Image (cartoon, rainbow, N blue to C red):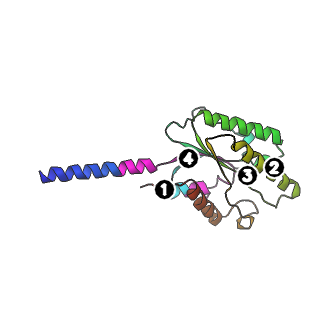
Amino acid sequence: MLAKGLAKIATVGALALTLEANAAHRDLWVFGDSLTSPANSWAEVIDDQGYAQIRNTARAGLRLVDVTMPNWLYCWQGEEVVLRLGTNDAGNNVPAAVYEQKLIDVLQFLQGRDCKVWLMLPIRFTGGGQELDQRLRQFKQITRRTGRNYQNVTILDVPYNEKETADGLHPTAEAQEIAAAWIIEALKLKREI
């Protein structure tokens, strides 16, 4: 009798831990460029440390205007989407109106798929000259203004320090870890059991 009671308690305890772990589990689909794609990126740090299951589709050189959201992407089971794009659009002279319309299209698509969206603002760096700095500032404003029109979107301005880069643009591994810590806090991620 005592053994059965202890077995029930152990089973209930294991079930509670499983439910707690599942409640803490977060699936994040990440769409980004080279600031997000390397093996040591903030996204991979978050995944490696067990804060979330990251599905990182980022690739170097990617521009928002080149992104096609996959038709199979639905967020009915709590999946979330992180967008960190715009820097290459500004750097490759994509017209601001074209960038803005593509951002609207992507955000409307994700809203229609019940996705919580974390919209990271494009970074600004001075290494590209004054004209690029102005375009980056403009694209950052467009991103912020457009994102504010959607209730499912949270805008993130992730800290970026040009002095902590490997080449004047791409963050060092240490800077990626700092960004990961900031994002973990901003998204209120909890380490999974």
Disc marking residue 28: 4
Is residue 129 shown left or right of residue 160? right
Q: Nearer the viewer, mark 4 or mark 1?
A: 1
- Mark 2 and mark 4: span between their CA atoms? 27 Å
Q: Nearer the viewer, mark 2 or mark 3?
A: 2
Q: CA distance from mark 4 to mark 1?
A: 13 Å
Disc marking residue 190 = 1
> Does the magenta portion include 31?
yes
Give, as a three-letter code, the residue at label 3: Pro
- The secondary element bearing badge 2 is classed as helix
Q: CA distance from mark 3 to mark 1?
A: 26 Å
Mark 4 Cα within 10 Å, few/some/many (few <14, many 20+)? many
User: Dot 1: what SS?
Assistant: loop
Badge 4 or badge 1: first in the primary sequence: 4
Query: Which element type, helix, strand or loop, lies under badge 4?
Result: strand
Question: Gap between marks 2 and 3, in whole Å?
Answer: 10 Å
Q: Quadrant of residue 40?
A: bottom right
Compare marks 3 and 1 and give the one earlier in the sequence.
Answer: 3
Image spot of residue 28 (x, y percent): 55, 46
Type of the residue with mark 4: Leu
The residue located at (39%, 50%) in the rendering is: 20
- The residue positioned 84% from the left and 46% from the top of the image is 93
